Image (cartoon, rainbow, N blue to C red):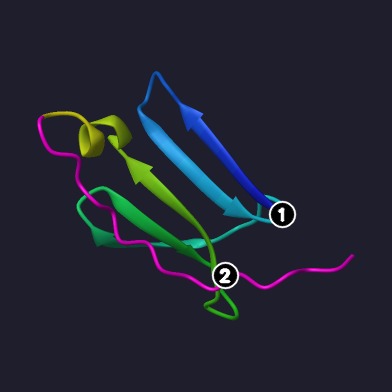
Amino acid sequence: MLAIAYDKDADVLYITEGRPRKAIGEMVEDGVIVRRDPKTKAVVGFTIVDFMEHFTGTKPQRIPLKAHFSAVVA
């Protein structure tokens, strides 16, 4: 399950795989944070700060997000 949430007041987009859990954040680009499992280092989500700033203006910007999510069967 991939969960996507947007906080309009803070202008932050959250993308999370599975249930919310503790993670280590790593800034990979201005305002783009990759969230990783502290034990396995697997990508568990992304946080994009100032989300709308990336997509306003005359030319939209691309945000390169690459990750492999595997299905978790409970």
Spot occupied by residue 3 in the image (x, y as percentages of width and height):
63, 45
Q: Disc 2 or disc 1, which is closer to the eye?
A: 1
- Please say if 16 is above or below 57: below
Q: Which SS class for mark 1?
A: loop
- Please say if 53 is above or below 65: above
Queried whether the magenta region covers residue 21, the answer comes back as no
Residue positioned 47% across, 70% down in the render: 67
* 58 on left or right of 56: left
Occupied quadrant, residue 64: bottom left
Cβ–Cβ under 8 Å for marks 2 and 1: no
Spot occupied by residue 60 in the image (x, y as percentages of width and height):
19, 40
Q: Which SS class for mark 2?
A: loop
Q: Amino acid at mark 2?
A: Asp
Occupied quadrant, residue 58: top left
**Magenta stretch bounds:** 58-74
* 52 on left or right of 69: left
Q: Amino acid at mark 1?
A: Met
The residue that disc 2 covers is: 37
Occupied quadrant, residue 26: bottom left
